[in-house]
Amino acid sequence: MIDALYSDAVLRLAANLPHSGRLDAPHGTGEKVARLCGSRAIVDVRLDGSGRIADFAQDVKACALGQAAASLLGQAVVGASADEIEALREQMLAMLKRGGAGPQGRFEALRLLSQVADYPARHASTLVAIEATAEAVRQALRRGDGAMPS
């Protein structure tokens, strides 16, 4: 049954991580580690004047599920607002832990990972890049980068 988690689609995504690396002079950086397995993500963001992600980079060392989630995130994250990132985080938590439908809109492709809900030990690794992105955006907004002009 666990083989279904590691489908060809998941493995292809895991092997192709968009926006891999780090940014020079990011507005915000987030780092998350899944304690159970050691999966880790460091995310750098730069925000535009309306607080949307203008530039994004991720350094992810995770299992195939964590890498696949980071890949799907990386495909859709540029242009996302802080509210969209927080909604993504909440929708993923609901999908994995409470039987929710999963992300909507620009991040709907992450529903591909809905089967992870049946494997609680894999939840944290699936979320590391998303959690790190939310932290990076919050940090950038606290610093005032990407704040809407008055």
Image (cartoon, rainbow, N blue to C red):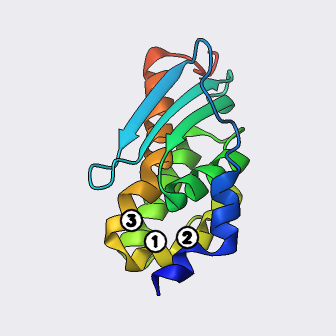
**Which residue is situated farthest in the left direction here?**
35
Residue at left 48%, top 56%? Answer: 63
Residue drawn 63% across the image and 75% down it: 7
> Which three-letter amino acid code belongs to the residue tagged 2?
Leu
Circle 3: residue type: Arg
Tell me the CA gap for discs 3 and 1.
13 Å
Disc 2 to disc 3, C-alpha distance: 11 Å
The dot on residue 82 is none
Q: Residue at x 61, y 39 (%)?
A: 81
Indicate left or right for 118 with 71 as reference: left
Q: Nearer the viewer, residue 120 or 104?
A: 120
Q: Please state the horizontal and vertical placement of residue 132, each as a whole percent of the image.
A: 45, 39
- Is the C-beta separation of discs 3 and 1 under 8 Å? no
| Relative side of 131 to 6, left or right | left
**Helix, strand or loop status at disc 3:** helix
Q: Quadrant of the C terminus?
A: top right
Q: CA distance from mark 2 to mark 1?
A: 9 Å
Q: Position of residue 122 (x, y in %)?
A: 39, 65
Residue behind mark 3:
122
Mark 1 lies on residue: 95
Residue plotted at (58% across, 35% down)? 58
- Number of numbered discs on residues: 3
Crowding at mark 2 (Cα within 10 Å: few <14, some 14-19, many 20+): many
Q: Is residue 125 above or below residue 28?
A: below
Answer few, some or many: residues within 10 Å of disc 3's Cα (few below 14, many 20 plus, some between 14 and 19): some
Nearer to us of marks 3 and 1 is 3
Residue behind mark 2: 113
Q: Which numbered disc flags the more N-terminal residue, 2 or 3?
A: 2
Q: Do callouts 2 and 1 mark residues in contact (Cβ within 8 Å)?
A: yes
